[in-house]
Image: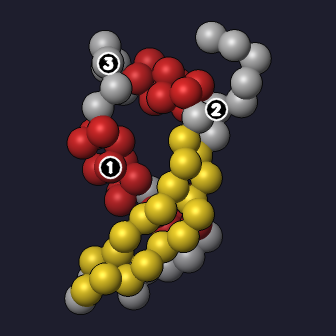
Amino acid sequence: MSGDKAYIKVKSITKVGDGQYRFDYQISENFKEVFKREYGLKRWSQKRFEKWLVENAEELTGRKQD
């Protein structure tokens, strides 16, 4: 792993339907490595990451969902 920071940057959240949102985000390769390690994954799982993102959206954005 290089010395780059592990980060996730939420660029925008758009409400697309009743209780549904679209996230536009950017994540670093180091974030992927940390995420895999924390969740015991051998390889990157976009599905698992998106589940985690939804579960943690309020904390990540500082917003409460409608």
Cβ–Cβ below 8 Å for labels 1 and 2? no
| Amino acid residing under circle 1 | Glu
| Amino acid residing under circle 3 | Arg
- State the CA–CA distance, disc 2 to disc 3: 17 Å
- State the CA–CA distance, disc 1 to disc 2: 17 Å
Residue 18, horizontal then vertical, whole percent: 24, 88
Answer with the quarter of the image where residue 5 lies: top right
User: What is the secondary structure assignment of the residue under circle 1?
Assistant: helix
Q: How many numbered discs?
A: 3
Neighbourhood count class around disc 2 (C-alpha, 10 Å): few under 14, some 14–19, many 20 upward? some
Q: Which mark is drawn over residue 24?
A: none
User: What is the secondary structure assignment of the residue under circle 2?
Assistant: loop
- The quadrant in which the N terminus is found is top right
Answer with the quarter of the image where residue 61 lies: bottom right
For the point 31% across and 13% down, the residue is 42
For the point 69% across and 13% down, the residue is 2
Residue 60, horizontal then vertical, whole percent: 56, 59
| Amino acid residing under circle 2 | Ala
Q: Which residue is mark 2?
A: 6
Q: Which mark is drawn over residue 50?
A: 1
Neighbourhood count class around disc 1 (C-alpha, 10 Å): few under 14, some 14–19, many 20 upward? few
Q: Is residue 29 above or below residue 2?
A: below
The answer to whether 39 appears left or right of 7 in the picture is left
- State the CA–CA distance, disc 3 to disc 1: 15 Å
The answer to which of marks 3 and 1 sits earlier in the sequence is: 3
Residue 15, horizontal then vertical, whole percent: 38, 83
Q: Is residue 37 above or below residue 31?
A: above
Q: Which mark is drawn over residue 43?
A: 3
For the point 48% across and 73% down, the residue is 13
The answer to which of marks 2 and 3 sits earlier in the sequence is: 2
Q: Is residue 62 above or below residue 28?
A: below
Seen from the viewer's position, the closer of residues 66 and 49 is 49
